Image (cartoon, coloured by chain):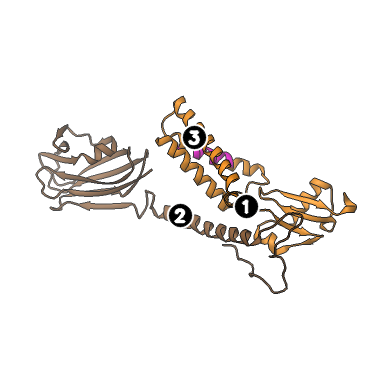
Amino acid sequence: MSKIPPQKPPHSDEWSDRQHPITEDMAFQRKTWRAERIGWVVLVVLLLLSAAGLFGHGLLSAATAQDGDGRLTVEYHRFARNGAMTRLTIGVSPPVAGDVVIRLDEALPRNFTIETVQPAPAESRMQTGGLEWLFRAGSDAASPLLVHVTLRSEQTGWLTARIGLAGSAAPVKLNIFIYP
Amino acid sequence: MDIVLRAAAMYIFLLVVFRIAGRRTFSQMTSFDFVLLLVIGEATQQALLGDDFSVTNALIIIVSLIAIDIVFSLAKNRFPKLDRMVEGVPMIVVENGRVLKQRLERARISEDDVLEAARELWGLETLAQVKYAVLEANGHITVIPKEEWR
């Protein structure tokens, strides 16, 4: 911040209004300057907040959620932007054997275009209130299953999405805000 | 509807940000200011167009921007207070050869800027030859020389 010069030294007539050759309004002018300075502070605060991740991709935005059984963990961004990509990682803790079925409620497909899912599910099917992805676990049952999903947001506003394992009573709840 | 709102949001946002930046910022444009302006335009364009590159979209955006601009100019004529808020007010910075230093400082302009304007407009050499120098609402400095230097 630049320093603001002393307000009104007693000998100074600089802040009085002149009438010639123009009609001045110094009171208004000084108000403008004050508003300008406040505006600079607001700009700096906005910059710091966006660096911190309030508008996505940062500390404030990174979130991790776990389901009731503690088997499913989702890392995601709390803040997304309309039209931009966001990622989430679904992790299923070991032992992972046989078929693993992950259920998404309709909030994700409705608000996002799901661009990529890695590894690709062996099967993707409709299910009441959302969709189901079926993954075939590899031979190594001891390592966790990690699914990386890239999403492109289509809507704006708050949304709550649920992701869970088939049969899980308490799926993971994701709270996401999409900026316009 | 979405497009019109986008255009309105960008218009008002740019208005506010440029007002905060102060009238000096783009008044005497340097070549760097010009480049900066282009880059800002580029960033704005993305937000305005989104991923819709159709002619219709462009037409709607242009019409919305121009319409907002017209409404604004009408409102400014109607409400002088709004005009002053958006455009600012003029201010004398040199009076009978005397520099009003505190004003210059607060307005973030230097004596050199005033001298430059005096040279450019009237071929003056010192501020003592200046009767009035005015920082106009649009950010330009205008100079009225003393009688003997006109």
- Residue pushed farthest right? B148
On the image, numbered disc 2 is attached to which residue?
A46
Query: Residue at position x 51%, y 31% from top?
Result: B63
- What amino acid does circle 3 point to? Ser
Query: Residue at position x 58%, y 41% from top?
Result: B73
Cα distance in 3D space between marks 2 and 1: 25 Å
Q: Mark on residue B64? A: 3
Taking depth in this image into account, of A51 and B58 the one nearest to the observer is B58
Give the chain ID for the brown colour: A
Query: Residue A49 appears at what percent x and percent y?
Result: 42, 55
Stretch of the chain drawn in magenta: B37-47
Q: Colour of chain B?
A: orange
Name the secondary structure under disc 1.
loop
Precedes in sequence: disc 1 or disc 3: 3
Q: Is residue B43 one of those drawn in magenta?
A: yes
Name the secondary structure under disc 2.
helix
The residue carrying pointer 2 sits among few (fewer than 14), some (14 to 19) or many (20 or more) residues within 10 Å by Cα, namely: some
Cα distance in 3D space between marks 3 and 2: 28 Å
Query: Residue at position x 9%, y 44% from top?
Result: A167
Cα distance in 3D space between marks 1 and 3: 25 Å
Query: Residue B84 appears at what percent x and percent y?
Result: 61, 52
Image position of B1 with respect to A179: above or below? above
Image quarter (top left, top right, bottom left or bottom right) of the N terminus of chain A: bottom right
